[in-house]
Image (cartoon, rainbow, N blue to C red):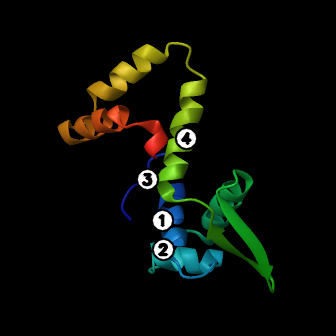
Amino acid sequence: MSGRRRPGQLETEIMTVLDAALRPLTPGEVRDALEPDGSLSYSTVVTTLTRLFEKGAVARHRDGRAFRYGALSAPAGLVADRMSRLMEVEPDRATVLRRFVSNLSADDERLLRELLEEDPSEG
C-alpha cells in the first residue's frame, strides 16, 4: 500500500477481508491478508478491529491469547452507516445531498435514481 489511506478506508478493507473469510480471523491473519509484506502495523489492525467491534460491525471471541473476529455485516453497510452519521450532524441536508449528487459519476447517478424509484416494500 503506498501513501496514507483515506479516513475509513482501513475499516472498509478489513470488513472486506472478514466478509470474504470462511471463518473468524485473528488480527494477524487480517493483517497478512491485507498486506502480506508486513508493512501494516499489527497494533493498527487490532485498534481498527476493536473500533469495529465497539460499533457492532464485527463479532469477536477469544481463541487462546488472541481474539478472532468475524463480520456481522457487509462492508457496504459500514460505509452506509458512516454516511448516515455524517448526515446527522449537518443541519443543511439539502445542500449536502445536492453536492453529493453533483459529484457522482453518471453511472452512480443513474443507479441512485433507480434505487429511489424502487418500491421500498419490494426490498
Q: CA distance from mark 2 to mark 3?
A: 24 Å
Q: CA distance from mark 1 to mark 2?
A: 6 Å
| Secondary structure of residue under mark 3 | loop
Residue type at mark 1?
A: Thr
Q: Earlier in the sequence, mark 3 or mark 1?
A: 3
For residue 76, above or below residue 72: above
Residue pointed to by mark 1: 16
Q: Nearer the viewer, mark 3 or mark 1?
A: 1
Residue type at mark 2?
A: Ala
In the picture, the disc for residue 82 is: 4
Residue found at the very far bottom of the displayed protein: 64
| Secondary structure of residue under mark 2 | helix
Label 4 Cα neighbours within 10 Å, binned few <14 / some 14-19 / many ≥20: few
Image quadrant of residue 51? Answer: bottom right
Q: Nearer the viewer, residue 99 or 9?
A: 99
Q: Tell me if I can see residue 39 in this picture.
A: no
Q: CA distance from mark 4 to mark 2?
A: 21 Å
Residue pointed to by mark 3: 4
Residue type at mark 4?
A: Arg
Residue pointed to by mark 2: 20
Q: In which quadrant of the rendered image does the N terminus lie? A: bottom left
Does residue 55 appear to the left or right of 106 in the view shown? Answer: right
Label 2 Cα neighbours within 10 Å, binned few <14 / some 14-19 / many ≥20: few
For residue 8, above or below residue 45: above
